[in-house]
Image (cartoon, helix red, strand yellow):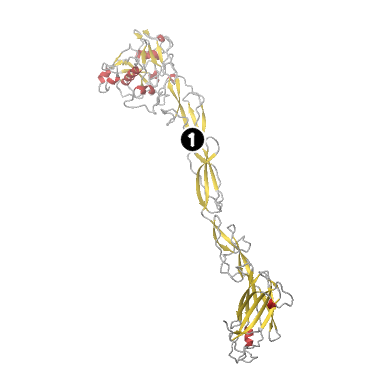
Amino acid sequence: MLYDDVGVFMKSYLINSKYFILMIFLLFMGIIFFIESCSNSSSLTSININLDLSKILKTSRNPTSLETNEYILKIYAYDASNYKKNDVIENLPVLSQSQSNVNVNGIVKSTLDVPIGYNVIFMAKIFLFVDNFIDDKPLYSGSSEILKIKPMGNKIHLNLIKTHTDIDIDINIEETQYFTVTFDSKGGNDIEKQSVKYGTNVTEPSSPTKQGYVFSGWYTSKDDGKTLDILFNFDTLITNDITLYALWIENENTSYTVEHYQQNILDNNYSIFETENKTGITGEQTLAEAKKYVGFTEKTFEQLIISPDESTVVKIYYDRNMYTVSFDSMGSNSIESQTVKYEGCVKIPNTSPNREEYEFLGWYASDDDGKTISEISFNFNTPIVENLVLYAKYKVIEKFIFVEGTTIKDNITATGFFDSDIFVSGTEVIIPSFYISDHEVTQGEYKTYCSYKNSSPTSSYGLGDNYPAYYVNMFDAFVYCNKRSIAEGRMPCYTIKNSTDPEKWGDPVENETDWLNVVCDFTVNGYRLPTEEEWEYAARGGNNLSSYQYKYSGSDTIDEVAFYSSNSKNTTHEVKLKKPNELGIYDMSGNLYEFCFSIYPDIPNNYCIRGGSITNNESYCTVKSNNFTAPNGTGTRNYGFRIVYTAE
């Protein structure tokens, strides 16, 4: 219990009387009631009572007395819903009441809760408290008008009347307000408003959430949230309505998606190939990057703004590269090229190339620009992944030209090039009927029965099934002739060590003498080398040598019929590319020297070679010119051979 120590006060009655009557001239100044809504109930409002009685106490104290008086303040709220004029207020239902002590400094505080919406009459009474008893009669009392209680804005006027005097005291009661603190989450989840009592603190709510952003506090704003001012301090006392605004910082790890689409093979649409999950700063641009896909080229794309809801999708499209597939008909009619998408397939051309004297075998790839052709034909189901050239592959149409036998006496009498070391005056040359291949033995034909011993043809000097076989010697030719004869059911011509089976002849180096003593049976139908006489007779066009005699086999102009030093580019060429002679025989001038089964004059164990080669000038390519070689030589890129067989 609080006491006021009264130093000086006036006594109107005796000190021993049951009640001590205090004659006080009360001056109430600044009595203010603040009424505000109760935070815990929407149906009550609270009256906070603050009274300053210090002046009353000061004037009421007797300086000569040591007595101390206490005072009690009682406030009543009566239900005036059914109040009628002249009704006794104390008989009305009491809605609420409070009782408070006045402390020694004359200050009293009290609270009274009153229902909102009621018609209420307030009554205040001040009592003297002596010797632990409250005086029966109030020193002061008074009531208000009938008031309709509202949450805020009530002004209550009480007229307190002193019991023992005629002095009237007016008490002005003003309600204490509640203020609304609104939280604008700026796109985040809703935060409930708070009703805060004047002069108290607002409770900091749970942080809101907003997808793609990080909450950074509540801020004040002077322009309704357009710009934020300062971070709000929740220790701040609330004295007015206020709106606080959420500050959001862009999330640096907001997810977005990058989708990569590749063009289809069969149409121009696109199908998703790969998906990437990336993160970035909300509201900033994406940092999508195109991939490097083999066979594809990315199209131009735009970076997007990263959406806070992580729904941003950057789509990057890739076109298939276009490749050209060309068809090299190898000197035949041209075939139109095709444009093909990456991993698409090229179509088989509707038209096949047509090359005279050759059979078209199909289209083949090459790793060295056509110098060498693949052994396997191109599979047109193969996906195209680069520019490609396909080469026509042909197989030479093998023909054996019949040369009717004859006897040539003396020298050549026909016009043209008649110079010869075979057909000379005073001689008689008997030519039996025979068949001669219209081309030099090709690499494709040779490898069917034989293999190379020392060196093999290379792309540098001509490589392919239709190129003439080189890096061979006469001994190799003997083996080829007999093996092919046996394979085709012909009677072999050559005998070595009393055998026509090359498998029994032994090594030509170790058994060179046996190989040099080779015997050829011209009467059987097996394959053999031509004699020098047969070779020149066929090269000159046969026909009893009665027709015009060309200097070269088939022409007086060497470039028409021969590959030689001036036009060969130092490499062999496929057979049957130049003009044939009158019998339809190719390359008897140039390309490769050809072995003949005739001993070169005055040089033992050396055989004639005829026709010239890619490294010789035109004088070596005439139908007259001859040269020689040892049959067991290692073979050079200048030597090849042509086969014949005796006609039955």
329 w.r.t. 55: above or below: above
Quarter of the rendering containing residue 191? bottom right
Packing grade of label 1 (10 A; few <14, some 14-19, many >=20) is: some
Residue at the far right in the pictured view? 85
Closer to us: 188 or 222:
188
Q: Quadrant of the C terminus?
A: top left
Q: Is residue 418 left or right of residue 18?
A: left
9 w.r.t. 445: above or below: below
| Secondary structure of the residue carrying numbered label 1 | loop
Quarter of the rendering containing residue 450? top left
Q: Which residue is mark 1?
A: 343
| Residue 116 visible, this orientation | yes
Q: Position of residue 350 (x, y in %)?
A: 52, 25
Q: Position of residue 533 (x, y in %)?
A: 35, 13
Quarter of the rendering containing residue 446? top left
The number of discs equals: 1
Q: Quadrant of the N terminus?
A: bottom right
Q: Is residue 601 left or right of residue 283?
A: left
Q: Position of residue 502 (x, y in %)?
A: 30, 20
Q: Report the amino acid beneath label 1.
A: Glu
Closer to us: 524 or 627:
524
| Residue 638 visible, this orientation | no
Closer to us: 299 or 124:
124
Q: Position of residue 107 (x, y in %)?
A: 61, 80
